[in-house]
Image: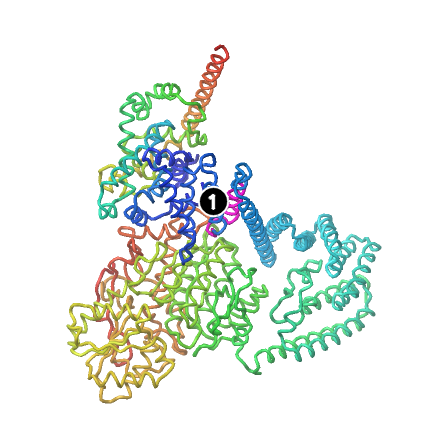
């Protein structure tokens, strides 16, 4: 026991962690007279009901079913009720089999135990023989699922090992590879086992432990030989030849090289053949081979262009060891499924090989003193080879996109899979049925590339490609150029900061920022604001993290695109990513209510807390114990808007625009309309569809004309800024209603400073918001402003050059502030947790403690979460837009400090 | 612990109360599963006898069930479940300790440690029946028993029972700030005790010795019983 702060508390908590005898519940039930057959039958029926319910809470139902079935076993003992006991055990086993929550292996073991116990009773009591078939079938199924699970875990370990290698973390690479090796052996996946053995050999060779490397290569060779995988055998032999060569065992090396050469020739891998020849120092032969290789490649390219990409993509991969040639740089070469080189899957990556050949030749030159002339010739040949390969890539891109100057992102999106491969572990781009490209990016995808105003798209995409290839240095250079080119681009800044976090080598936690940054029906300015706020918080937090014990923060960008229903899929992707990356502990998002609603359940199931910056629908109140928000619900802003409309604008005839199918619009309209201060009989309601006005100006014009025929003195627009912008533009063209005011909710803040829409008549706008840069001045003119404002101005100083989310030079809008506060509150909560590693559940617990006296002072006001996840009595403001297009705070309600 | 138990332990009280209000007989087991470990740990800390602690927790659940059968649905839904159950357990522990006055005194006062030791050794049940936490934890139990009663209860309910300060305040019928202050002071005192290693070491050795004695004594008892059986 030590006297460290927190240690005593931890040990005291351990006193509460005691085993509970199974008999306790049974004794209580016996004393209550519950353990009767009738009661057990009822419990069994309840369990069956839970087992058969397949709605979104299926996992909870399964856990409940397990609890009920266990009760039944207290009564239906094998001695007294053998048939019932078997049936219950079977159902209990099935419940465990289906249960995905928690440790799947443990669940599968529990399932097998149930099935086996039941089988034992069947044989003991000579029960009905059909049970034997059913139970044996389920045992087989469970074992199969178990093998899949183990294989999946092995794949994950191997993939992490691969990534660790790219990070040059050689010690932990071996740990992961050995873990993968153990699991592959358990499931008897011999090809995978051999591949991992070969990889371990490569690592050992990098660590200059040649004896050990040779042992692993030997084991890999034996397995590949048993499986008759000629190419893999050749690759291992080449590696063994290299080791022998390094040991100056020239005869043995020669022998290995000859064997490898023969096999590469048999399988027709000319590049590897050339590589072996280079290793053997046979320059003349090498020149001939490289020339032949170039010819072969040119033919391949032509064939590739003729057939299109898809055919070549279907070519099977010989095995995963292709990129792993035996010398140290092998892991640094691009992976065989490099998206830039799909047609080369059946060859070693040319760039890697050329580098390798060059290295070989340099070595040969030193040792055997080759003539300078020959080296020049060789270099020219290699350059030619690279030009051909580069040309092929360009040709492939042109063919796949169908347009010589097509947007690269469109090409990437077109190639995105409709389902992520398990090896992606949740990170990556997915194409939906509607053709939208959504997903999660750690920098390997650039989402904000096709929207108006973004000028650094090409650089971001190049950086993403570099990150995919594991070249962080190049990615960092490109991202640095991107943020110089487009200072308002927070996405690029986030990825750049992420690279720095990874390079720092310090512990870090990962938070996911939920956005809608692609598509034609989204609020671009609003979403960019969210990313800007998040970036300021990330940068501020990391810049204060100076000690070696400090935990940095990395941000992933999750994009749900146009369709809010995609949020469910993306949230599941986040859950998947969190399973393999335990640094992912929470989510900031989304800023729209509908997406947030759709993401709630998957994130709750994954035990990841979500704090939303601006989703304000009343439907979200108390929706999940893992849900929190920084913005108050619509009830508060709807009411404030209604009061202002009545008392200050003296509105008598109000036209209310609402999309009843959208959670935010419906909730805001309802709260506005139902305020007792308004005469609801004098409100006409115009229904529209969110996103439709932004896309179809004629529709906006037609519906507006219908409404204007009512001669309203106020329009209340319960919706988003892109639609409201279209409506304002239509209204601006109508001189008859030059003085008509338009009111709305917090989302209309995004219209301020958004020059992409060129909205006219902004000065007719009044809106409520959950944050404003004027709040500090309004509530306490003597109080100093938080450093956030200065930081924001410094980072995004030149945003005036491009469409940005501010309403004045260097001044953030409400969404920026809310997003900043959201990330800050998540980070603040994480800092209150003294245990490591941090989990989503820990973070949730810490968030629940931000309440009452422990409130967090944000830039947008005081944040104290209630039991329902809403901030308690948080300030709501009302702003008017002046003739200069600036939003000025005129009214506020609630607690600010 | 199985997955199902974990599920029940994480079940929200409000959700649980809805189930109980819906049908007490069908879902009462969820309440038992949710609270049994925390109540047992708390009761064991108080009475320091495994069987007694189990009896107390069983009794807590039986009384809770009996009360719930008489409550209208609205009242069930409004219950503050954790503080209610811990209050029942606390009262049952007090009753138990009152019955065993000597034991109660011994826990509160270090000077009667010998008396507690003798009483503990004299209890029926084999050593396997007595919960044997890790050695350091046993020493921590001992240190905890040296704290003033208010401090000890605040710590036990908060850390061992897993209650919040507000819930502890309800169980102890004291203001929230008072119980929080008791808890923090208690932890501070414990930290001070641990910072005196020679004292802590002595305490630890004493508790280990106590366990060894207990095991030895029990072995002797078992041998005696077996001898008697052989003779008879």
Task: Name the residue at 54% across, 47% down.
Answer: A130
Assign a secondary structure to mark 1.
Answer: helix
Q: Is residue A600 left or right of residue A772?
A: right
Q: Position of residue A23 (x, y in %)?
A: 40, 33
Please state which of residues A226 and B211 is positioned toward the viewer in this rendering.
A226
Q: Chain of mark 1?
A: A
Task: Name the residue at 28% across, 54% down.
Answer: A866
Q: Position of residue B10 (x, y in %)?
A: 38, 47
Q: Which range is magenta?
A: A99-116
Q: Main secondary structure of the magenta part?
A: helix
Residue A109 within the segment the image draws in magenta: yes
**Residue at the top extreme, as displayed:** B231
Please state which of residues B176 and A268 is positioned toward the viewer in this rendering.
A268
Decide: is A853 above or below A463: above
**Residue at the right extreme, as displayed:** A251
Colour pattern: rainbow
Q: Position of residue B194 (x, y in %)?
A: 40, 32
Which of the image's four quarters has the C terminus of chain A?
A: bottom left
Decide: is A642 above or below A40: below
Task: Please give the residue where the numbered disc 1 appears in the rendered image.
Answer: A87
Residue A75: image quadrant is top left
Q: Is residue A77 left or right of residue B75?
A: right
Residue A5 within the segment the image draws in magenta: no
Q: Is residue A458 left or right of residue A763?
A: right
Residue B60: image quadrant is top left
Q: Is residue B157 left or right of residue A313?
A: left
Q: Position of residue A393 (x, y in %)?
A: 63, 76
Q: Residues within 10 Å of mark 1 (few under 14, many from 20)?
A: some
Please state which of residues A39 and B61 is positioned toward the viewer in this rendering.
A39
Which of the image's four quarters has the N terminus of chain A?
A: top left
Count of marks placed on residues: 1
């Amino acid at each position: 026991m030590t006297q460290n702060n927190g240690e005593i508390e931890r040990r005291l908590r351990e006193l509460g962690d005691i085993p509970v005898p199974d008999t306790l519940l049974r004794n209580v039930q016996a004393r209550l007279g519950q353990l009767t057959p009738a009661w057990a039958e009822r419990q069994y029926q309840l369990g069956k009901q839970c087992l058969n319910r397949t709605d979104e809470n299926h996992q909870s139902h399964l856990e409940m079913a397990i609890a009920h079935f266990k009760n039944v076993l207290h009564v239906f003992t094998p001695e007294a009720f053998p048939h019932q006991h078997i049936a219950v055990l079977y159902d209990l086993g099935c419940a465990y089999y289906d249960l995905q929550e928690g440790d799947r292996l443990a669940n599968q073991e529990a399932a097998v135990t149930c099935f086996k116990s039941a089988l034992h009773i069947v044989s003991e009591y000579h029960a009905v023989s059909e049970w034997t078939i059913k139970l044996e079938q389920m045992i087989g199924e469970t074992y199969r699922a178990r093998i899949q699970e183990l294989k999946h875990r092995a794949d994950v370990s191997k993939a992490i090992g691969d990534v660790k290698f790219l990070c040059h973390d050689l010690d932990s690479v071996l740990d992961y590879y050995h873990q993968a090796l153990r699991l592959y052996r358990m499931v008897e996946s011999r090809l995978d086992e051999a591949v991992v053995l070969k990889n371990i050999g490569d690592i050992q060779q990098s660590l200059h432990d040649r004896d050990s490397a040779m042992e692993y290569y030997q084991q890999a060779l034996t397995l590949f030989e048993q499986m008759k995988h000629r190419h893999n055998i050749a690759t291992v032999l080449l590696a063994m030849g290299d080791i022998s060569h390094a040991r100056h065992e020239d005869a043995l090396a020669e022998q290995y090289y000859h064997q490898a050469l023969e096999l590469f020739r048999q399988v027709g891998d000319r590049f590897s053949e050339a590589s072996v020849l280079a290793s053997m120092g046979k320059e003349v032969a090498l020149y001939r081979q490289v020339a032949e290789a170039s010819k072969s490649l040119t033919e391949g390219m032509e064939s590739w262009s003729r057939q299109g990409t898809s055919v070549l993509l279907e070519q099977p991969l010989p095995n995963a060891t292709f990129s792993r040639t035996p010398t140290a740089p092998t892991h640094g070469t691009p992976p065989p499924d490099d998206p830039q080189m799909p047609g080369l899957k059946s060859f070693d990556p040319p760039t890697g090989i050329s580098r390798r050949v060059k290295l070989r030749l340099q070595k040969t030159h030193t040792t055997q003193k080759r003539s300078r002339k020959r080296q020049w010739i060789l270099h020219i040949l290699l350059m030619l080879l690279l030009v051909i390969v580069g040309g092929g890539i360009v040709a492939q891109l042109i063919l796949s996109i169908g347009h010589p100057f097509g947007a690269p992102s469109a090409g990437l999106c077109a190639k995105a899979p409709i389902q992520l491969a398990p090896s992606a572990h949740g990170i990556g781009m997915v194409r939906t049925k509607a053709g939208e490209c959504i997903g999660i990016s750690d920098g390997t995808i650039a989402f904000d590339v096709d929207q108006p105003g973004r000028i650094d798209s090409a650089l971001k995409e190049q950086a993403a490609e570099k990150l995919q290839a594991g070249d962080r240095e190049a990615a960092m250079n490109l991202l640095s150029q991107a943020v110089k080119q487009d200072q308002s681009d927070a996405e690029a800044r986030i990825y750049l900061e992420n690279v720095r976090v990874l390079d720092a080598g310090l512990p870090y936690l990962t938070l996911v920022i939920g956005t809608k940054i692609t598509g034609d029906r989204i609020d671009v300015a609003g979403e960019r604001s969210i990313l800007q706020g998040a970036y300021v918080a990330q940068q501020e937090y990391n810049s204060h993290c100076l000690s070696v014990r400090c935990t940095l923060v990395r941000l992933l960008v999750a994009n749900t695109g146009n369709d809010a229903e995609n949020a469910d899929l993306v949230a599941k992707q986040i859950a998947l990513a969190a399973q393999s990356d335990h640094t992912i502990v929470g989510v900031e998002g989304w800023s729209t209510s509908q997406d947030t609603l759709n993401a709630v359940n998957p994130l709750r199931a994954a035990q990841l807390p979500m704090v939303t910056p601006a989703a304000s629908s009343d439907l979200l109140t108390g929706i999940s114990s893992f849900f929190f928000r920084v913005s108050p619900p619509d009830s508060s802003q709807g009411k404030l808007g209604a009061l202002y409309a009545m008392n200050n604008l003296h509105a008598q005839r109000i036209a209310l625009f609402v999309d009843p199918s959208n959670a935010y619009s419906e909730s805001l309209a309802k709260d506005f309309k139902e305020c007792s201060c308004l005469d609801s009989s004098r409100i006409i309601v115009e229904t529209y569809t969110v996103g439709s006005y932004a896309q179809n100006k004629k529709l906006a014009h037609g519906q507006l004309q219908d409404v204007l025929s009512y001669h309203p003195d106020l329009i209340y627009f319960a919706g988003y800024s892109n639609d409201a912008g279209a409506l304002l533009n239509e209204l601006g063209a109508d001189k008859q209603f030059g003085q008509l005011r338009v009111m709305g909710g917090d989302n209309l803040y995004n219209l301020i400073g958004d020059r992409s829409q060129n909205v006219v008549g902004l000065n007719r706008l009044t809106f409520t918001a959950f944050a404003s840069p004027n709040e500090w001045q309004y509530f306490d003119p003597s109080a100093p402003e938080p450093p956030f404002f200065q930081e924001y101005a410094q980072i995004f100083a030149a945003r005036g050059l491009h469409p940005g989310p501010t309403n004045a030079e260097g001044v953030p809008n409400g969404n920026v502030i809310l997003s900043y506060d959201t990330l800050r509150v998540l980070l603040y909560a994480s800092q209150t947790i003294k245990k490591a590693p941090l989990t989503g559940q820990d973070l949730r617990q810490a968030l629940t403690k931000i309440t009452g006296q422990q409130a967090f002072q944000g830039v947008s006001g005081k944040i104290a979460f209630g039991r329902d996840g809403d901030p308690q009595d948080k300030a709501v403001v009302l702003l008017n837009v002046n003739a200069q297009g600036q939003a000025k705070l005129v009214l506020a309600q609630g607690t600010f400090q | 612990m199985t997955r199902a138990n974990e599920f029940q332990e994480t079940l929200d009280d409000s959700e649980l109360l809805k189930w109980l209000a819906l049908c007490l007989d069908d879902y009462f087991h969820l309440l038992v599963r949710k609270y049994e470990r925390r109540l047992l740990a708390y009761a064991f800390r108080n009475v320091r006898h495994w069987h007694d602690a189990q009896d107390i927790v069983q009794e807590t659940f039986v009384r809770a069930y009996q009360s719930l059968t008489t409550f209208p649905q609205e009242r069930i839904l409004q219950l503050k479940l954790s503080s209610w159950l811990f209050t029942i357990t606390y009262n049952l522990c007090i009753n138990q300790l009152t019955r065993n006055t000597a034991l109660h005194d011994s826990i509160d006062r270090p000077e009667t440690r010998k008396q507690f030791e003798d009483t503990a050794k004299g209890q029926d049940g084999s050593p396997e029946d007595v919960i044997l936490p890790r050695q350091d934890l046993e020493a921590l139990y001992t240190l905890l028993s040296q704290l003033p009663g208010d401090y000890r209860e605040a710590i036990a309910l908060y850390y061992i029972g897993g209650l919040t300060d507000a819930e502890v305040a309800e169980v102890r019928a004291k203001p929230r700030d008072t119980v929080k202050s008791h808890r923090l002071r208690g932890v501070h005192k414990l930290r001070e005790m641990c910072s005196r290693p020679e004292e802590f070491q002595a305490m630890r050795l004493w508790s280990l010795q106590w366990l060894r004695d207990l095991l030895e004594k029990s072995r002797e008892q078992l041998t005696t019983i077996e001898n008697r059986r052989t003779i008879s």
